[in-house]
Image (cartoon, helix red, strand yellow):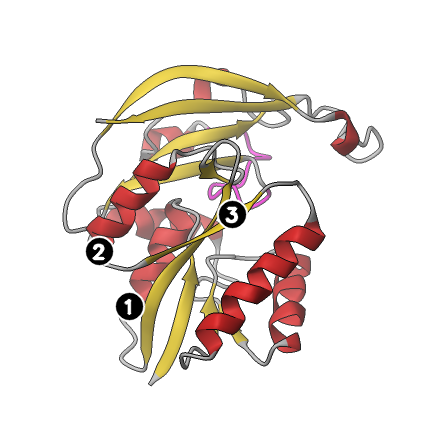
Amino acid sequence: MIKAIFTWSGGKDSSLALHKIQQRPDVEVVALLTTLNKEYRRISMHGVREELLENQAESLGLPLIKMWVEQDSYDEYEQRMKDVLLEYQSQGVTHVVYGDIFLEDLREYRDNNLAKIGLKGIYPLWKRDTSEVIQEFLALGFKTVTCCINDQYLDESHVGATITQDWINALPPEVDPCGENGEFHTFCFDGPNFSQPVVFDSGDNVYKPLDEKYVDETKNPHVKGFWFSELIPR
């Protein structure tokens, strides 16, 4: 039996990948691992509150490992990730599961870091057509809402929206239907592996301009910032 940690973002790809890995009789997911910003107590990049993350883990029936980061630093992230994984490796964990679909450089980065400490990655959605992935996600009865929008691709009207077939159909052609290039992030609140829906209210939309140190006019001349939907635990 393979013992694995699942890197959980709280979004749709994580939810579908977890569902798929739980269908494998040879893999035991021992816990969810989520990176949170220590200052704001929210899921990194997604901006979702810690309490909603806890509610997801409770509904999924899995222990939750919170990995806190303070700075936007790869060095800090890598060191904290290494410390967490080494702790669970000592308890028999040999693999880490990711919801990535087609970003080769991201997978290479993950696999190289895992190899340094003798672990391996599992990618249940790897190289699948993203149009098929989102169709399967919806067909299985998962429900998700957009929590973060990259304004290079989409405007404020898309944040806080429940993803439906109509929403997918209306996306601009340059936007991946799973947001795999970072166009949008989601919060999944129900599905076949949830014991009950995660209940929340939608508050105001919040705009966060991109920190100047991350602005690269040659690569992303149109990125100004991100729209976040303030999801409030009920």
Query: Which picture quadrant has residue 71?
Result: top right
Q: Is residue 165 above or below residue 101?
A: above
The rendered magenta stretch, by its main secondary structure, is classed as loop
Indicate which disc, 2 or 1, sits on the residue closer to the N terminus.
1
Residue depicted at 64% across the width and 60% down the height: 79
> Is residue 160 visible to the viewer in this orientation of the structure?
no
Residue 89 is situated, as x and y percent measured from the top left of the image, at 47, 77
In the rendering, which numbered label is found on residue 68?
A: 3
In the rendering, which numbered label is found on residue 22?
A: 1
In the rendering, which numbered label is found on residue 193?
A: 2
Q: In the image, what residue type sits under mark 3?
A: Trp
Q: Given this view, does label 3 or label 2 mark the residue nearer the observer?
A: 3
- Label 1 secondary element: loop
Q: Is residue 9 magenta?
A: no
Q: In this picture, which residue range is highlighted in magenta?
A: 171-181
Indicate which disc, 3 or 2, sits on the residue closer to the N terminus.
3
Residue 155 is situated, as x and y percent measured from the top left of the image, at 53, 19
Q: Are marks 2 and 1 in contact (CB under 8 Å)?
A: yes
Residue depicted at 37% across the width and 38% down the height: 50
Query: Which picture quadrant has residue 60?
Result: bottom left
Q: Quadrant of the C terminus?
A: top left
